[in-house]
Image (spheres, rainbow, N blue to C red):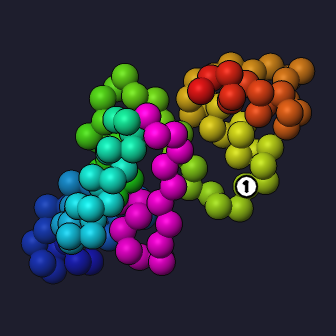
C-alpha cells in the first residue's frame, strides 16, 4: 500500500527491522559506541533494554552487521525464556556443542562457563 502510493522501492514497515534504515539519534550513537567498546574490551555480556519502539532491535542488528565474523554472538530476543531455555539458546547461538545427557541446567551453565 505505502510502497505504491509513495513510490518506495521497498516495503517501509517490515516485521523484522532492517539496519540499513537506521536513522540514529545521538542516544543510538552512544549506545552503539558503548556496546562496541564492551565487546572489543571483552567486558562480557551486553544487555540492551528500553521501551517498545525505541529501536533496540534495529540497533542490535546494526551492531551485528558491523562486527567481524570472528566475533561470536548470541541474540536472545525472547525475554520470557526460563533459565534452562536461555542457556540452551545461548549455547546454540555460540555453536557450543552439548548432548542430551548435558541437557540439565547445571550442565548447560558449566558448558557456558567453560566457553567463556
Q: Which residues are magenta?
A: 42-58
Q: Residue at x 68, y 29 (%)?
A: 112
Is there any visible trace of residue 1 in the rendered image? yes
- In the picture shown, does residue 71 fall above or below 4? above
The extreme left residue here reads 7
Where residue 101 appears, as percent x and y from the top left, is 89, 21
Is there any visible trace of residue 61 in the rendered image? no
Left or right relative to 61: residue 11: left
Q: Which of the 4 quarters of the picture holds residue 13?
A: bottom left
- In the picture shown, does residue 93 fall above or below 114? below
Q: Residue at x 36, y 68 (%)?
A: 55
Q: Quadrant of the C terminus?
A: top right
Q: Residue at x 78, y 49 (%)?
A: 83
Q: Which secondary structure class fits the magenta region best?
A: loop
Please check the rendered image and state whether residue 105 is part of the magenta-colored stretch, yes or no: no
Where residue 58 appears, as percent x and y from the top left, is 35, 60
Q: Which residue is mark 1?
A: 81
Left or right relative to 111: residue 78: left
Left or right relative to 35: residue 102: right
Please check the rendered image and state whether residue 46 is part of the magenta-colored stretch, yes or no: yes
Q: Quadrant of the N terminus?
A: bottom left
Secondary structure beneath dot 1 equals loop
Where residue 85 appears, as percent x and y from the top left, is 76, 45
Amino acid at each position: 500500500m505505502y510502497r505504491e502510493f509513495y513510490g518506495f522501492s521497498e516495503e517501509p514497515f517490515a516485521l523484522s527491522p532492517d539496519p540499513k534504515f537506521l536513522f540514529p539519534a545521538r542516544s543510538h550513537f552512544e549506545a552503539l559506541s558503548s556496546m562496541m567498546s564492551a565487546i572489543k574490551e571483552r567486558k562480557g555480556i551486553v544487555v540492551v533494554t528500553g521501551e517498545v519502539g525505541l529501536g533496540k532491535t534495529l540497533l542490535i542488528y546494526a551492531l551485528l552487521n558491523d562486527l567481524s565474523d570472528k566475533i561470536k554472538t548470541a541474540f536472545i530476543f525472547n525475554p520470557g525464556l526460563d533459565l534452562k531455555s536461555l542457556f540452551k539458546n545461548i549455547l546454540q547461538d555460540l555453536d557450543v556443542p552439548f548432548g542430551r545427557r548435558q541437557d540439565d541446567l547445571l550442565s548447560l551453565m558449566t558448558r557456558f562457563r567453560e566457553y567463556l
